[in-house]
Amino acid sequence: MKLLTRAGSFSRFYSLKVAPKVKATAAPAGAPPQPQDLEFTKLPNGLVIASLENYAPLSRIGLFIKAGSRYEDSNNLGTTHLLRLASSLTTKGASSFKITHGIEAVGGKLSVTATRETMAYTVECQRGDVDILMEFLLNVTTAPEFRRWEVADLQPQLKIDKAVAFQNPQTHVIENLHAAAYRNALANPLYCPDYRIGKVTSEELHYFVQNHFTSARMALIGLGVSHPVLKQVAEQFLNMRGGFGLSGVKAKYRGGEIREQNGDSLVHAALVAESAVAGSAEANAFSVLQHVLGAGPHVKRGSNTTSHLHQAVAKATQQPFDIFFCLLLFLWLLPESHYSLFSNQVDKMNTKKLFTDSLLQLEIKFKKKNERLGTVATTKIPALREAEVSAFNASYSDSGLFGIYTISQATAAGDVIKAAYNQVKTIAQGNLSNTDVQAAKNKLKAGYLMSVESSERFLEEVGSQALVAGSYVPPSTVLQQIDSVANADIINAAKKFVSGQKSMAASGNLGHTPFVDEL
């Protein structure tokens, strides 16, 4: 086995032993690579290791940790948000400059993503450079220094990052929805509260890492990497913190409502009830119900007109939806949840502003042209209605939320929300055909299979399962679980939503938006 010999190897700051070079294996010359199965190992300290040697030109390694925002408390809210942005800060073995330029030099990428339950540090690079990126990955996750002046310099980025994310109204509504639905844990925000910006200290970061970045809360997943080598690295360098760390509290669902009145012409509203725990048979029933109702269009520029929710809302409001609202809505719903070491959030914000200004100028030109022709001043598309609606479904390790998410013009908000809610009531009363159920299952299975086709999503899927269950369920088993959902299970899921304690979050001009107790 080859050994690390370059200056700055793992051994310099972790161990007196020589560290193995993390190299992806290669098939024998002249022989086609043989497909390999996913290898899975759980060490005595609780660390889970999984790898798939796919012989791809790029390798990807992810370290998944049970350290999401739900593990914060009232005294350190915003810690995980700052950790997401702190991946390039100086560590015990590498300076900020070395991390940044070392990754750039090999054309690699280090990214950090976070949910309410987990944090994921992922590196991607060419197969021959895995050892370099792995060194930086271990530096960032196991040996951060969090120097006070570097942490202080990073604080303003919290405000910018939050402002960019909250340009998307959906982000703010979902944050408020969790705050309204839960008393603790899952109520904690993904983004640092305003009153905490500038107050998150290096001591708080060290405390959080020491108590949550432990071996028993980690899963190391690799694609395009040899399993024995990955296992050896994990045993040698991810065994520094044993135990389970601080145990998190169980999420307590309470039901509630948060309304944010502002000048937006569109009303975003989410209405949910508690659903099921991730990985359970009941969670599968809610997933099928989501696709029975309508989980959004799956075709580029699709109108989603075949979904039950869309058809119900179309009957409740007849006015066509302005094309420019649709274009702007699409623009603001671009994903902002991925945090990369080299992504520039300011550039994203400027790009969105540029497109917004361009669309508004285009609208003015269309209006002037229509006025000259003596036609209506606003361009319309009959297929696009005054509202868009889809089913909302989120499952966690000890709870879940299911309901409806609507986007509508202010005057139609009440009719849209009530029409969508009544559609779920219709299914709860047993109005469900076998054809609809089979179509929903097919959509769910197709969506799942397509999602794990990419290495990025497959890595996330394996990492999530490894943290929750300590094992991996192959796609064939997942498809069988979906097929096993009975019509009665779907109806019971709808009944649970209808009879459950509701939570609601809404933003926009809420003069015509009903309160949760009026539904």
Image (cartoon, rainbow, N blue to C red):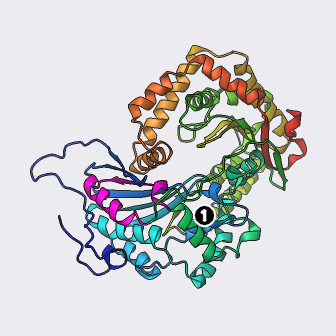
Q: In this view of the protein, which residue sits in the foreground, 340 or 183?
A: 183
Res. 314 visible in picture: no
Q: Quadrant of residue 71?
A: bottom right
Q: In this view of the protein, which residue sits in the foreground, 20 or 156?
A: 20
Res. 68 visible in picture: yes
Image quarter in which the C terminus is found: top right
Q: Which residue is mark 1?
A: 80
Residue 362: horizontal and vertical position, in percent?
68, 56
Q: Which residues are magenta?
A: 214-240
**Residue at the outermost bottom position:** 149
Image quarter in which the N terminus is found: bottom left
Give me the residue at 61% from left, 35% from top.
Answer: 295
**Residue at the outermost left position:** 30
Left of 314 or right of it: where is 412? right
Left of 46 or right of it: where is 253? right
Give me the residue at 63% from left, 60% from top.
Answer: 355
Query: Tag 1: residue type?
Result: Thr
